[in-house]
Image: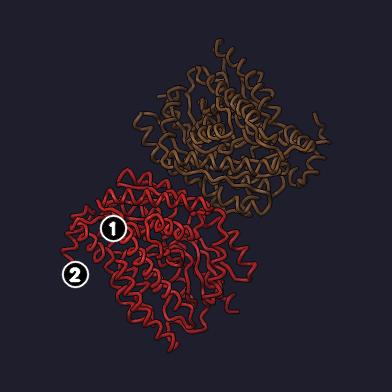
Chain colours: A red, B brown
Amino acid sequence: MATYQEIRQMWSDIGMDLDKHDGFLNTFPGIYNRIIQPQEGRPEKIDYFSKVVTSVHGRRPYELYEHKQKGGKVFGTYCVYVPDEVLLALGAVSTGLCGGDQFWVPGGEKYLPANTCPLIKSSMGSRMDRTSPFCQVADMFIGEATCDGKKKAWEILAQDVPMHIMEVPQMKRAKDIQRFAEEIWQLVEIAQELTGNQLRPDTLAESIKTINNKRRALKRLNRTRQASPVPISGKDALMVIQIAFYDDPIRFAEMTNILCDELDERIIKQEGPFPAEAPRILVTGTPMALPNWKLHHLIETSGAVVVCEESCTGTRYFEELADENRTDLTGQILALAERYMKTNCACFTPNQARADDIIRYAKEYKADGVIDYTLQFCGLYSTESYLLRESLKNEGIPFLHLETDYSEQDSEQLRTRIEAFIEILVN
Amino acid sequence: MATYQEIRQMWSDIGMDLDKHDGFLNTFPGIYNRIIQPQEGRPEKIDYFSKVVTSVHGRRPYELYEHKQKGGKVFGTYCVYVPDEVLLALGAVSTGLCGGDQFWVPGGEKYLPANTCPLIKSSMGSRMDRTSPFCQVADMFIGEATCDGKKKAWEILAQDVPMHIMEVPQMKRAKDIQRFAEEIWQLVEIAQELTGNQLRPDTLAESIKTINNKRRALKRLNRTRQASPVPISGKDALMVIQIAFYDDPIRFAEMTNILCDELDERIIKQEGPFPAEAPRILVTGTPMALPNWKLHHLIETSGAVVVCEESCTGTRYFEELADENRTDLTGQILALAERYMKTNCACFTPNQARADDIIRYAKEYKADGVIDYTLQFCGLYSTESYLLRESLKNEGIPFLHLETDYSEQDSEQLRTRIEAFIEILVN
């Protein structure tokens, strides 16, 4: 394990703005200490994940740094449509770069309109202000054409970093899946060039299994949340899912399975951080990048518990597995395209499948109500909310749409609305 | 020409909400009378276009109504990427449906988030409130996946009207042009089914020429604006371009050429509505649907004149012609795909070609400055503004970015900023 001095030296070596970053260090552990740490009835095995989070800019970035010193490459990604499998199979490491902290928003606003979603502004600011070791350590950034905001932000980011953009289709016809396979092939070419390695069916088969195992562990974690009482809080479960975007996938799956062993025991003993009668909330909508625990914190300090996230930091990330039975590269890449195109992001039209997912999850997780969380100025999810509300109404599922940003300014207003919603669920 | 009584009967027949629509009639001619009519030094031949605009819900809708009574079909469109050529070749009429009036915005906000661009809200409201004869007379609506807002709004609109969506690629690689050709082929199938007609190379060749002739007339109109003094105001030129989306294309080209004959004479006589020394403004950005003359009015009542619009209601609509020399359907459809994919909308990534266009136009039109107009909550154009500003700065072209909606609330604020910008240009 690297010492603090070694980590600070790394931050300097990778070109971070140490003074500005000290500002982040002054606020960040505070968020954890205020929101995550004080929870009661946490499982013991959450300890590993807590440690990863509290040393988020040290522990894992140092591993990436060491990987690079051995000649390895690091890819930074911003979307669950980027297939980590091919990057891993080429000996590279991929890491999520989405910003979840208000700290980075003003830095992003220097380049982006204020009317941009906070996730994009935060991601941009963390790179432009040189205050994220993940951004600094990445050799190449993989963007995607999903939403308007990201698509155009990458053009600005590309002035600062080596960037490759994947075109994500906007529909899901058979030809669109073929097209996405072509996009994956193009990523393979780019990544082969950067890593100097050739994609081989055996290593790709292995990496498909590795990433599937990470997803299986997350699916197992989520299944435990179907129990009543839930064996783990929504905040802790979300934190584990968020870490999946950064951590080594093999170690992550191992540690998540160890946590799940404990949660399975808790289920038998009917133990958990919330009473069995606590209203159960399914959260849906835009992703919650680390350390965005704002909504979960409001819900879980208002007497309810979050049992599932239909989100990119939730089921959209791990619900679908890639077929492990293809043996040639053409078949494997197509299997990846098929798997990724099953993800029901609001960037697709139409996207009724997302509403169907939510209705199914609401039943599986015995949710009492659905809270639809939209980051401000995300036109895709806020507009989709209209038809989602109709679909859930037809099923008699209570629904609350909330729009917010990363600041704390609206917290008490949101709390009032959330409390009123929970009260309806209880009565 | 239909009488007012016949027109009112038509409005009733096509299912308009006559009471609500009376509200529109109470405000609409007022906008024309306040903004367009009082201009001095207008060309005589603008008269035709003024008449079309002042009877916008009567004259042309009645023609469409008669077309339908003879068994013809009407397609409503919202985007310059929809190829009118194939619809026309199948004996159908296509008409623009984009809303440009604040009157329709509240109706749109019943279905869409307030944080949606006013053009989309206005378009949605005009249909949902049954107050647009163009929306009521259309047999089928053609939407497109261009921006997030429109893409998701079409899903809601599709609950109310028969709708076909075209997938517009987000990049401009050779394969993307092929893909767009496939999208046009799909539109052909849909339109063949609705009209009962078969696409033939001879009728398509004719309609390609018809639409090209409309574009040639508009290009000719715009070329006259390169003269100094300009022979026509920006407001009048914009009004002509806006009408191109609704009018019969053959008659429109004819009337525009008659207007251009007069403008050519004016150029020789050095006549025009503004003195030669008036600062010349190139407007770029989001489209201005009829009757959105807000920005032009502010500029042209502040001492400057608008000489060109790099916009969907401007050069992006008519600058490129389709190749008329292909003789088989495959070649013709590909020619259309090639032509439409030359349009440099901010929905593409990257989109440096748009900045290049603007720089070229600034020279051709001898613009003293560029005003970048973004409808509020249009993430594509507002984000692209950052790189556009940089490109123009490198060329030493003065640049002002403005963001606004359809209301009049910010007019005086905008005027102050526009006047300050013009003052810089003069000094």
Q: Chain of mark 2?
A: A
Task: Residue at 38%, 32% (x, y): give it.
Answer: B392
Q: Residues within 10 Å of mark 2 (few under 14, many from 20)?
A: few
Q: Position of residue B140 (x, y in %)?
A: 68, 44
Residue B29 vs residue A230: left or right?
right
* Disc number placed over residue A134 in the picture, else none: 1
* Residue placed most toward the observer, B78 or B384: B78
Q: Position of residue B163 (x, y in %)?
A: 64, 48
Comparing A209 with B173, the one in front is: A209
Horizontal relation, residue A303 to residue A83: left or right: right
Percent coordinates x, y for residue B221 in the rendering: 57, 22
Task: Tell me how many marks there are.
Answer: 2
Q: What amino acid type is highlighted by mark number 1?
A: Phe
Res. A87 image quadrant: bottom left
Q: Determine whether A254 is above or below A355 in the image.
A: below
Residue at horizontal 45 percent and vertical 67 percent from the top: A319
Question: Judging from the image, what secondary structure is the residue with disc 2 in?
Answer: loop
Q: Earlier in the sequence, mark 2 or mark 1?
A: 2
Q: Residue furthest front?
A: A327
Q: Are marks 2 and 1 on the same chain?
A: yes
Asked where in the image residue B113 lies, by quadrant, the reply is bottom right
The residue positioned farthest toward the bottom in the image shown: A269
Q: Is residue A30 above or below residue B120?
A: below
Q: Quadrant of the C terminus of chain A?
A: bottom right
- Alpha carbon separation for disc pair 2 and 1: 18 Å
Find residue A1 and name its label. 2
Q: Quadrant of the N terminus of chain A?
A: bottom left
State whether residue B303 appears in this view. Answer: no
Amino acid at dot 2: Met
